[in-house]
Structures are given as structure tokens and as C-alpha cells.
């Protein structure tokens, strides 16, 4: 992973940390501003989208498109909710970021109560909070990649 991709991941992590949430609602424009302000990295939207795509393909991020119905009945798009996966938390934890290991434990307690190997919510938590119904073929949790980890793999990752 190159420096820019890692900086994008760190920026998204800090937005999640600042608002004490499980996802980041920052727009692409805001992420670009934060990259320039804190990492001294200047990129355009297209480059940011390539980096976000690569991070999603690597299983480090999960993005959920959000829309809301206005009072007049039309649909309005909101910023995409971007979540850190367990894999990203483990990677950041191994880099020495202690918040990532605490976030990983929060994810485990929220989505694996009692050590269950299946995510609890059938729909993404973000969509339930916003009371939105968006049809999707992908029914997996927004915070986890498609591969479901076993209980022993999860505890090995958190102990590392």
C-alpha cells in the first residue's frame, strides 16, 4: 500500500474517531481538504476515487450509498457512508494505532455478541438508523468483508 492510500485510510479513520461512530460521512471534497491539511497530499477527485476503490477491493473499506426521500416524494442522495472493516482495524492496530484495536473490540461486541461467528443485523446498521429502505443484493454487514472469520481467527487478530 502506497503512502497516499494509507493516508486516505488514516483520514477516514480520524473522521470516524472524531464523531465516535462506526462510519464516516465526509464527502470526497472534505476528504481531499483533510488530506491536504494534515498530510500535505494534493490529489483530485478521480485519484481519490481510485484510492477508495483499491481500498474497497483490498477489503479495508466498505461503502454504503445513502439516499433519503424528501417531503415532496423525490429522492435525494446523501454522502456515502464509508466503514472500516475488521481487516483495516487489524492493519492499523499492527501499525501501532491503539484506537483501531479499541474500535475492533467495539465491532466485535456489536456484531458478534457472545462470540457468535455471524453478524447480527440482517441489514446494515446505518440504513436502519436512517430508516431507509434501499434494495441491495449484498446482505452482508457493512463493516466486514465477504469472508466470514471464525471465532479463533478474530481473537487471534485482536490479541496480536
Image (cartoon, rainbow, N blue to C red):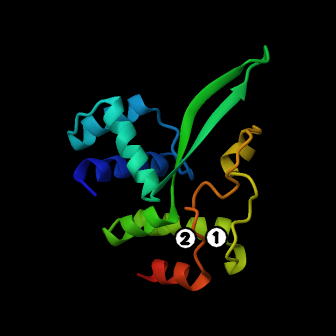
Q: Which mark is residue 73?
A: none
1 and 2 marks in contact (CB < 8 Å): yes
Please rate how many residues cluster around mark 2, counting C-alpha atoms within 10 Å: few if below 14, some from 14 to 19, many from 20. some
Question: Residue at label 2?
Answer: 105
List x then y, in percent, for residue 103.
51, 63
Residue 124, above or below 151? above
Residue visible at 78% across and 13% down in the picture = 72
* Residue placed furthest toward the top: 72
- Quadrant where the image shows the C terminus: bottom left
List x then y, in percent, for residue 134.
73, 38
Considering the numbered disc 1 on the image, is that residue within a helix, a strand or a loop? Answer: helix
Instruction: Looking at the picture, tell me which residue is in the foreground, 61 or 41.
Output: 61
List x then y, in percent, for residue 90.
43, 69
Q: Which mark is residue 109?
A: 1
Residue visible at 77% across and 39% down in the picture = 133
- The quarter of the picture where residue 31 lies is top left
- Quadrant where the image shows the N terminus: bottom left
* Residue placed furthest toward the left: 40
Amino acid at each position: 500500500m502506497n503512502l497516499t492510500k494509507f493516508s486516505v485510510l488514516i483520514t477516514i479513520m480520524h473522521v470516524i474517531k472524531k464523531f465516535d461512530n462506526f462510519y464516516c460521512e465526509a464527502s470526497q471534497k472534505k476528504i481531499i481538504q483533510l488530506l491536504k491539511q494534515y498530510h500535505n497530499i494534493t490529489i483530485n477527485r478521480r485519484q481519490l476515487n481510485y484510492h477508495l476503490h483499491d481500498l474497497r477491493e483490498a477489503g479495508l473499506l466498505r461503502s454504503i450509498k445513502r439516499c433519503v426521500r424528501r417531503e415532496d416524494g423525490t429522492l435525494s442522495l446523501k454522502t456515502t457512508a464509508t466503514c472500516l472493516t475488521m481487516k483495516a482495524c487489524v492493519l492499523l492496530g499492527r501499525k501501532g494505532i491503539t484506537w483501531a484495536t479499541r474500535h475492533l473490540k467495539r465491532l466485535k461486541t456489536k456484531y458478534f455478541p457472545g462470540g457468535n461467528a455471524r453478524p447480527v443485523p440482517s441489514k446494515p446498521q446505518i440504513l436502519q438508523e436512517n430508516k431507509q429502505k434501499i434494495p441491495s443484493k449484498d446482505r452482508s454487514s457493512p463493516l466486514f468483508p465477504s469472508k466470514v472469520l471464525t471465532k479463533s481467527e478474530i481473537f487471534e487478530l485482536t490479541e496480536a
